[in-house]
Amino acid sequence: MDNKLKILVVDDESRMRKLVKDFLVKRDFDVIEAGDGEEALNVFYDDKDIALIILDVMMPKIDGFDVLKEIRMSSKVPVIMLTAKGTEYDELKGFDKGADEYITKPFSPKILVARAEALLRRSNLLENEERIEIGGIIIDKTAHIVTIDGNVIDLSFKEFELLTYFCENKNIALSREKILNNVWNYDYFGDARTIDTHVKKLRAKMGEKGDYIKTIWGMGYKFEV
């Protein structure tokens, strides 16, 4: 019995498919390919155990948005959209149609694989880790919903992962480097202000519970209730 998770890679450029496939296979995934939207839908309907779809937007026959729209009628399978256009409109359209992640070309395959793994971890969670309750905050990892004192708060993908990571590591001092490696899933060569910006937004959305995220000057953060 083959327990490898199966990923469908859809792109009309065979070079791009090969690049992505090679990286995924190295990480022990089973990869199937489709060269256009029509083929993608046929493969998707024929194969019931696809765990994740990596889907290019610009394709002949049926574009990525329409493929996603049709898939979402019958399935919640995680989908990462690839696009050559980095416009906010396209990104919003992707999320509106039910994309889970959005990556603009050109991208690093390493980052794509890291995002894919993060999404799969999120979708195939172990029973006992599906729900975290702490200080009036409830994180439902399966449904990807956070409620604070009974009110649902609207978090981005990264804000959700950040809050989850804080809650799972409560009372532990976390360096910015550690947060980057765990929440962003790759060695980040930018600067740590990315985290500070996300923390600021997250605190604002959490209202008074934002005070649970304590700043440790010169180091990072600690989540304390």
Image (cartoon, grey):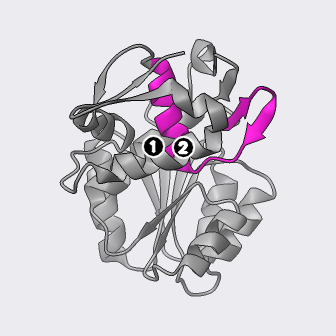
Q: Secondary structure at mark 2?
A: helix
- Mark 2 to mark 1 CA distance (whole Å): 5 Å
Q: In the rendering, at what x and y percent does residue 215 appear?
A: 37, 31
Q: In the rendering, at what x and y percent does residue 130 appear?
A: 63, 21
Residue 202 badge: 2
Residue 153 magenta: yes
Residue 183, relative to residue 126: is it above or below? below
Q: In the rendering, at what x and y percent does residue 50 appear?
A: 57, 46
Quadrant location of residue 18?
bottom left
Q: Is residue 44 visible?
A: yes
Identify the residue shown where x is 34% and y is 53%. 194
Identify the residue shown where x is 74% and y is 67%. 69
Q: Nearer the viewer, residue 59 or 194?
A: 194
Q: Quadrant of the C terminus?
A: top right
Q: CB under 8 Å between callouts 2 and 1?
A: yes
Q: Amino acid at mark 1?
A: Val
Number of other residues with Cα within 10 Å of mark 1, as a class: few under 14, some 14 to 19, many 20 or more: some
Q: Secondary structure at mark 1?
A: helix
Q: Which residue is mark 1?
A: 199
Number of other residues with Cα within 10 Å of mark 2, as a class: few under 14, some 14 to 19, many 20 or more: many
Q: In the rendering, at what x and y percent does residue 53 appear?
A: 54, 56
Identify the residue shown where x is 33% and y is 42%. 185
Q: Is residue 121 visible?
A: no
Residue 150 falls left or right of residue 139: right
